[in-house]
Image (cartoon, rainbow, N blue to C red):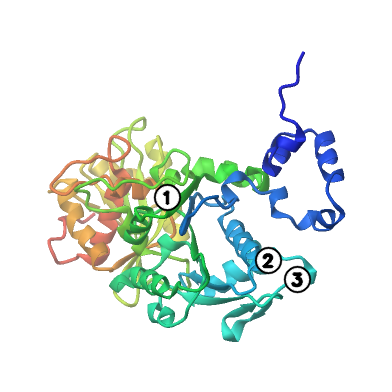
Amino acid sequence: MTDDRKPVTDMTRTEIFDEATPEMRTEFAEDLKQDARNVFDDDFKNDAHPGQEAPGGDWRNWVIMAGRGFGKTRAGAEWVRSITDTNQNAKIALIAASLGEARSVMVEGESGIMSVFPPESTPVYEASLRRISFRNGAEATLYSAAEPESLRGPQHSHAWCDELAKWNNSHRRAERTWDNLQLGLRLGEKQQVLATTTPRPVPLLQRLLASEGTVVTRGATADNWRNLPLAFMAAMDREYGDTALGRQELEGELLDEVEGALWSRALLERCRVAADDAAPLRIVIAVDPPASATGDACGIVVAGLLADGTARVLADCSVERASPESWARAVATAAREWEADRVVAEANQGGAMVASVLRAAELSLPLKLVHATRGKSARAEPVAALYEAGRVSHAGLFARLEDQLCGLMAGGGYEGPGPSPDRADALVWALTELMLKGRGRPRISGL
């Protein structure tokens, strides 16, 4: 029987630590020179996966476009370390969506720049100056992509742009930031930019991917499985595994937009906000009841009206394949947890039965029944216009809901997942109740 494995001397470091036996690893370590042994524990190649290693060849832009948890930040920090280890004249721009994110993720985060250097060569970070000074004279400066003019004037040899697809592109800020960076990237003999990002179909990322001199590393969350908790991997698969948003956020796939859809991925990304303490003035829960217990989901969406007159989608509490009693209990539970001021339920399917089922689950439910007199797409169009006007935000990711929104077509039709956009329909009812009362509002039937 023959051993088809390559000799240790012919294997890359990554191949050794992916495939080698413990004996082979020991043999490799023992063959290292003393200087190499001294830094062995701090050598990123010992535990990097192939997608985190810089490509060879002559490139200007390297894009790591991969799922959450792939190790993009660590790859970026190690790339900066590799530059400063060999180039004492390096001037590096570190650009994030905001200065706070540049500091908390790129510099001080668990996988940030300060974490990847051994103690004896840790650089000096001066937060007030937005500057990192490395022991050999190289420097890095922090910038916010929300302030394009801050990059007008400074010169750099390298740049690391983190979560590029997340940069705010209102008034073309993201593209202006990129352009100002490029115009100042003129130091040294070989200028290079690393962009680490989760894929989103925004203009700047699409432009970069089409640019000559760009090399792309693609990857999924699972590629970094050695450094991720199994519980996290299982939870992500349960929540997003069969959704288009999961293909984007976990698999690292750049999704195409559905031509003619009322919502786009780019629009939804612009509307997404982090959780905050904003207290809604009014909270509405909308329900799109299923036609049967074995068919569609019961759409249950929570939305709130904020003090500035905008609306925020707070939760998707929809349930799949539930009996009338089960989905009614889910509505009642959501109403209690969110202290809803109103529960709006579409009554085209079931009429009085919908009311009686919901009342049975919670007698005091503040219920209104609404009757659809127009098709789903016609009802959705004015709500989509609210998104376009920046009057609706999403408090987080709602994968299945957003998949359905991106399948609702202008002029009628549905090209999203599943037979019916039940979650999207519930969202439309909720935002209609909050934002469009008195302007072509659907007919309300009092109880």
Whole-number angstrom distance, CA of label 3 to CA of label 2: 10 Å
**Residue at the top extreme of this rendering:** 1
Give SS at disc 1.
Answer: loop
Q: Which residue is nearer to you in this view: 243 or 330?
A: 243
Tell me what residue is drawn at x 75 percent, y 31 percent: 7
**Label at residue 85:** 2
Q: Earlier in the sequence, mark 3 or mark 2?
A: 2
Instruction: Return the residue nearer the eye: 350 or 315.
Output: 315
Q: Secondary structure at mark 2?
A: helix
Query: Is 359 on the left or on the right of 137, as rendered?
Result: left
Q: Is residue 262 visible?
A: yes
Q: Residue at x 37, y 54 (%)?
A: 212
Q: Is residue 249 above or below residue 10?
A: below
Would residue 288 be seen by someone viewing this image from the given angle?
no
Where does residue 98 sit, x and y in percent of width and height? 47, 73
| Discs 3/2, front | 2
Kindly identify the amino acid type of the residue bearing the numbered disc 2: Asp
- x, y (%) of residue 14? 68, 42
Q: Where does residue 86 sit, x and y in percent of width and height?
A: 66, 65
Going from the N terminus, do you reach mark 1 or mark 2 first? 2
10 Å crowding of disc 1: few (<14), some (14-19), many (20+): some
Q: Which one is in front in this view, the residue at disc 1 or the one at disc 2? A: 2
Question: On the image, numbered disc 1 is attached to which residue?
Answer: 317
Q: Which residue is mark 3?
A: 121
Amino acid type of disc 1? Answer: Cys
Disc 3 residue crowd, few under 14, some 14–19, many 20+, Cα 10 Å: few
| Figure quadrant of residue 205 | bottom left
Identity, as a three-letter code, of the amino acid under mark 3? Ser
Q: At 58% across and 72% down in the image, what residue appears?
A: 90
Residue at (20, 46) in percent of width and height = 409
User: Which badge, 3 or 1, is on the more N-terminal residue?
Assistant: 3
